[in-house]
Image (cartoon, rainbow, N blue to C red):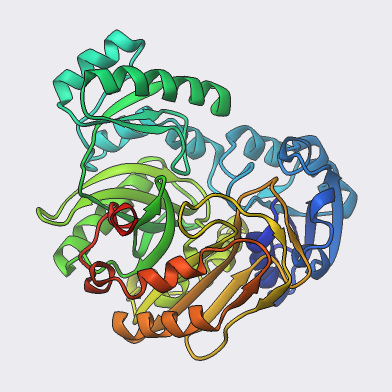
Amino acid sequence: MIESLLVANRGEIARRIIRTARRLGIRAIAVHSEADADLPFVTEADEAVCVGPANPAQSYRNVEAILAAAKSTGAQAIHPGYGFLSENADFARTVEASGLIWVGPGADAITAMGDKINARNLMAAAGVPVAPGTTDPAADLDAAVVAAAEIGYPVMVKAAAGGGGMGMGVATDEAALRTEYDKVRSFAERMFGDGSVLIERYFPRVRHVEVQILGLADGRVVALGERECSVQRRNQKLVEESPSPAVSPELRERILAAAVRAGEAVEYRNAGTVECLLDSATQEFFFLEMNTRLQVEHPVTELVYGVDLVEEQLRVAAGLAPTFDPDALAPRGHAIELRINAEDPKRFLPGPGVIRTWVEPTGEGVRVDSGYVEGNTVTPFYDSLMAKLIVNGATRAEAIERAKTAVAAFELAGPKNNLPFFAELLENEEFLSGDYDTGIVPRMR
């Protein structure tokens, strides 16, 4: 097993990775910005190194500083968490070229799946269903107009190099397409350094379902069930649950098999997620994208399948067999994750500030993965996620009841937060029925 691990991330995910590392007897090393010096992940690590000022480009995305920290601390491996450099193929290659172990998929897989058009084409060739759309970037606005006419409105205009729900727009007609194309292309050039745009069919009432895959050290790819991620604001997830209430046993078999084929097509190793759009009325699903990293919502899979995905990541990176039997994977019970963000619960606008009160809920079936404690400051420099409240129960109904109790018991004052939104959602008839789609949050507003 790896003996020392540098965590190239911050907040709750850094703290969560450090927790598993220390349980396994691995020396855990944190890197942090000047703004994060007082956060729990820094104090809980065995060693910590400041890698720069608050600006992520000068700290958490500063490759030279991170590699220097790894060298100075004698780190054997680097875990990138999610976001920042986690899906940067050049960083993965540089880590390995430096003689360190990269805890993630190979750089070639990251590259192959990082471009949405290339990923779509690869998946289609592997027999994975893909939504109608362009097989090459729309070179200019005229090409986008022609493509949209062939696909049929409404269409989704997407940044080919985008991710995390960013760089996307919906066009219901040609006039809207002309506006969205320029907007998405400009955003993509600014944010991703790549203005390539693809056009896909847009499904107004659809569910977002994803599959957790794990590429093992022996070359096999296994699927650890699916997650429902349809409660979203601005195409970004707020709630995830597993299993999905929309997935029948027959559909589960098909969608998990497709996800495994997706992983095999790029010789995937380590943890990843195959995201799909699901038409629950027809039971048709389409490949959306593959996230070549650990997902924010991985805890629901951990609770339902009884595995520690970070431990499995470390074992794959070290060339070790998994702790579980790949031929005997079976879900047990139901889990739900709520993302506790520092944001207004109505308009979902960021609301950073000093945490005056922070008391986490406890009890049977309740887990909190948090990045902060009382007295910390949520700064405006990073994502607004403060904590993940995860509950599990024998049934979905039991998990929901535990979620209601936990939300009510979570004492949080200082920054604006979305706990009131979750209290509302957990009483919403559409959500309670399980028959909801990605439009549920706008309908609540």
Q: Where residue 143 sits: x, y (%)?
A: 28, 11
- 171 left or right of 197? left
Q: Is residue 83 above or below residue 125?
A: below
Q: How many marks?
A: 0
Q: What residue do we see at 15% from left, 20% from top?
A: 150
Q: Residue furthest bottom?
A: 364
Task: Mark yes or no: residue 33 visible.
Answer: no
Q: Quadrant of residue 381?
A: top right
Q: Where residue 45 sits: x, y (%)?
A: 80, 66
Q: Dividing the image into 4 quarters, which one contains the C terminus?
A: bottom left
Closer to the camera, 59 or 341? 341
Q: What residue do we see at 75% from left, 64% from top?
A: 41
Q: Where residue 309 sits: x, y (%)?
A: 52, 66
Q: Is residue 362 above or below residue 132?
A: below
Q: What residue do we see at 50% from left, 38% from top?
A: 110
Q: Residue furthest right?
A: 72
